[in-house]
């Protein structure tokens, strides 16, 4: 059992809805997982608080129901024919009284709660009858993505509570992640702040983040009024000020390391030193002094922990596409090819769209070195593609490069079990013109079978005529 499954069962147990088959598994997980035990404690405390808080309202609702019921007068038996009286009394006893009581109670609850006036943030993991409500006025942001449980604590409080995706956060709230949990907050100014595992921050304002420990990646939205975005790295007593930029900061006891991905960040170290760190540079601050400032050989590797969050955003995420483009732009040193290609492969089929767009674009066809890169991209696509990518692979069958066609044909054979009479090696060794008939067959095959592959774009296979028009005569 993992933590996500456990969190679902914790709410069911508190509500008394867990079945016996899951009790032992949940107990075994809780015995080993301190984070989930903390969830149990927090949710149990919240449930008890809610029970006490709503007791007066339940009593008031019951009183209103009793008064409403007292206004109903049941006709004497003699006033109605026997069959009708029997039916009337039976209906009233079975349904009438409970329905009126429920309606009265619901009406009172609506009047008391006034849901049209409040913005509520439910807490993650709570069951239907134990969902605590936090009223958030003027939130500075909301939790947009998380790989596990994320906890918040109101200002001047030690009461940590789990926060669900979409939940709002007010100014001054503390936020923390546990082991192996990463998350992203979308701030009200449009900026994004991502927290790595075992990270603790305070969202002091819409454009101010205070990092107590861990690692934070900020993608800053540039405002028209030029208002700065500030990150305070508490362990190093360092203030980082940025406009529109993206940067990563890692905090450890007594020091902080800044890595700027794009743009620039002004660094003030405890009033002792200040400097500007630009895209592609990193700076470590220790004990109020700059330890070193250096060029970063591979920015993507330095910030690769955010890839897990980008993958959660979907295959067409533009930031993910830019990261893959940057990796391929760095493919110039043979000793680095293997490592960089492995970074892309880690993204699985989420890299297929960016890589196929790279292969199809002019930027992959400028120099002889680009030919090597686009072939590597085609090999990765062939290895990681799943069935939703079949249309993209069919499009690559019309590429001018035989190695790209070979990779696409191998992937299609793996995913569909079909070759349509042409072996992958023949796509590589024979001219593109000789492959035209089989390309047309693949297009016809897709039209007949596209309904069998959910998740694939049924209309993304490009017309054959477009490819024929694009083929240079010397490549045919």
Image (cartoon, helix red, strand yellow):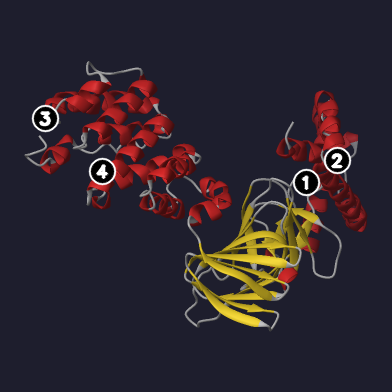
Does the CB distance between marks 2 and 3 fall below 8 Å?
no
Of the numbered discs 1 and 2, the one sitting upstream in the chain is 2
Instruction: Tell me the CA gap for discs 1 and 2.
Output: 8 Å
Residue 463 % position (x, y): 19, 37
Res 126 label:
1
Residue 194 % position (x, y): 61, 58
Q: Which residue is mark 4?
A: 371
Q: Depth check: 149 or 473 in front?
A: 473
- Residue 443, located in which quarter of the rendered image? top left
Of the numbered discs 2 and 3, the one sitting upstream in the chain is 2
Residue 419 % position (x, y): 28, 18
Secondary structure at badge 1 equals loop
Does the CB distance between marks 1 and 4 fall below 8 Å?
no
Does the CB distance between marks 3 and 4 fall below 8 Å?
no
Q: Which residue is mark 3?
A: 433
Instruction: Tell me the CA gap for discs 4 and 2.
Output: 60 Å
Instruction: Tell me the CA gap for discs 3 and 1.
Output: 62 Å
Viewer-nearest of labels 4 and 2? Answer: 4
Viewer-nearest of labels 3 and 4? Answer: 4
- Residue 242, located in which quarter of the rendered image? bottom right
Of the numbered discs 4 and 2, the one sitting upstream in the chain is 2
Q: Is residue 144 visible?
A: yes
Residue 283 % position (x, y): 58, 68
């Amino acid at each position: 059992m993992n933590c996500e499954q456990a969190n679902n069962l914790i709410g069911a147990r508190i509500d008394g809805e867990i079945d016996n088959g899951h009790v032992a598994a949940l107990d075994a997980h809780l015995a080993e997982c301190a984070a989930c035990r903390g969830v149990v404690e927090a949710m149990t405390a919240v449930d008890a608080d809610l029970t006490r808080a709503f007791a007066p309202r339940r009593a008031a609702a019951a009183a209103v129901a009793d008064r409403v019921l007292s206004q109903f007068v049941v006709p004497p038996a003699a006033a109605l024919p026997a069959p009708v009286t029997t039916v009337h009394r039976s209906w009233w006893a079975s349904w009438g009284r409970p329905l009126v009581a429920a309606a009265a109670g619901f009406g009172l609850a609506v009047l008391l709660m006034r849901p049209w006036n409040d913005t509520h943030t439910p807490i993650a993991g709570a069951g239907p009858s134990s969902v605590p409500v936090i009223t958030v006025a003027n939130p500075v942001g909301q939790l947009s993505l998380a790989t596990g449980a994320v906890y918040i604590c109101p200002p001047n409080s030690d009461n940590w509570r789990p926060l669900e995706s979409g939940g709002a956060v007010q100014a001054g709230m503390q936020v923390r992640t546990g082991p192996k949990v990463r998350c992203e907050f979308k701030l009200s100014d449009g900026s994004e702040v991502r927290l790595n595992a075992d990270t603790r921050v305070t969202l002091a304002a819409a454009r101010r983040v205070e990092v107590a420990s861990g690692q934070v990646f900020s993608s800053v939205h540039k405002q028209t009024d030029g208002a700065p975005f500030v990150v305070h790295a508490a362990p190093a007593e360092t203030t980082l000020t940025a406009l529109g930029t993206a940067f990563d900061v890692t905090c450890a006891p007594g020091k902080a390391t800044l890595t700027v991905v794009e743009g620039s960040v002004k660094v003030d170290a405890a009033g002792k030193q200040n400097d500007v760190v630009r895209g592609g540079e990193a700076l470590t601050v220790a004990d109020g002094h700059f330890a070193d400032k250096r060029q970063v050989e591979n920015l993507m590797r330095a910030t690769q922990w955010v890839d897990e969050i980008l993958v959660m955003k979907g295959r067409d995420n533009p930031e993910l596409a830019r990261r893959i483009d940057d990796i391929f732009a760095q493919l110039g040193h043979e000793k680095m090819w293997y490592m960089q290609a492995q970074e892309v492969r880690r993204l699985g089929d989420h890299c297929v769209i960016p890589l196929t767009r790279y292969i199809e674009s002019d930027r992959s066809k400028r120099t002889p070195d680009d030919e090597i890169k686009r072939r590597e991209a085609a090999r990765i696509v062939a290895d990681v593609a799943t069935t939703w990518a079949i249309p993209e692979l069919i499009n690559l069958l019309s590429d001018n490069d035989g190695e790209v066609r070979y990779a696409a044909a191998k992937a299609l054979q793996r995913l569909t079990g079909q070759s349509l009479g042409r072996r992958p090696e023949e796509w590589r060794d024979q001219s593109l013109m000789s492959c035209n008939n089989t390309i047309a067959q693949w297009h016809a095959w897709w039209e007949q079978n596209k309904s069998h592959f959910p998740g694939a774009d049924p209309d993304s296979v490009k017309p054959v005529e477009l490819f024929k028009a694009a083929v240079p005569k010397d490549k045919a």
